[in-house]
């Protein structure tokens, strides 16, 4: 039964296939690296006396957790429910990141908010990539749930006896 379920994990095509999972993880990794560059560059230019840069630190933590998760997925066969929940947690973190910077840098930017960053355009790009990251993590969460349902259905089919004995 487990062997049949694992063979389903390694199939190549479809929404839960290896190609789709690898593509999504690659896009998530690229998105997190871009966000690390955007927010890290801005954070590195803050004066040492400035202590209210928690939004940028939060952005860096979210992007680092995202990148680390993608790297782990490259080397490990992830097939536990906990990892599906972790995808959802990252989706929520990206939603919060979008809200934190979107509230400040989308639309008309107040003078004091524009003075905090090196580039309002970069912060707006960061919001766009946070939205993309949120969507990608939501998709992998849905993909993980779908895979669990498929495996459960396959396992249930193999548990049934073929006929009267």
Image (cartoon, grey):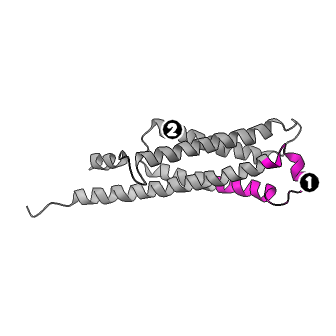
Magenta stretch: give its range: 93-121
Q: Residue at 86% of width from left, 57% of height from top?
A: 109
Marks 2 and 1, how far apart at CA: 41 Å
**Residue located farthest toward the right when viewing the structure as drawn:** 111
Which mark sits nearer the N-terminus, 2 or 1? 2
Q: Nearer the viewer, residue 135 or 86?
A: 135
Q: Where does label 2 land, which residue?
A: 72
Tag 1 secondary structure: helix
Q: Residue at 67% of width from left, 50% of height from top?
A: 129
Tag 2 secondary structure: helix
Q: Which mark is residue 142?
A: none
Q: Quadrant of residue 95?
A: bottom right
Is residue 115 depicted above or below 106 in this figure? above
Please identify, in this view, whether the residue under mark 2 or under mark 1 is nearer the observer: 1
Looking at the rendered image, the quarter that the C terminus falls into is bottom left
Q: Nearer the viewer, residue 28 or 59?
A: 28
Q: Where does label 1 land, which residue?
A: 111
Q: Quadrant of residue 135?
A: bottom right
Residue 22 x, y percent position in the rendering = 47, 43
Q: How many marks?
A: 2
């Amino acid at each position: 039964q487990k062997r049949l379920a694992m063979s389903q994990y390694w199939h190549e095509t479809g929404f839960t296939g290896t190609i789709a999972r690898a593509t999504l993880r690659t896009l998530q990794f690229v998105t997190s690296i871009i966000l690390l560059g955007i927010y890290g560059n801005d954070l590195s230019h803050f004066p040492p006396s400035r202590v209210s840069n928690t939004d940028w630190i939060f952005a860096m933590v979210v992007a680092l957790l995202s990148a680390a998760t993608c790297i782990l997925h490259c080397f490990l066969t992830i097939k536990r429910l906990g990892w599906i929940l972790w995808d959802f947690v990252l989706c929520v973190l990206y939603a919060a990141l979008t809200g934190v910077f979107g509230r400040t840098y989308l639309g008309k930017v107040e003078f004091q908010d524009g003075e905090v960053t090196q580039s309002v355009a970069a912060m707006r790009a960061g919001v766009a990539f946070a939205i993309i990251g949120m969507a990608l993590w939501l998709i992998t969460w849905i993909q993980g749930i779908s895979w669990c349902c498929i495996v459960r259905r396959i396992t249930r089919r193999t548990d049934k006896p073929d006929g009267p004995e």
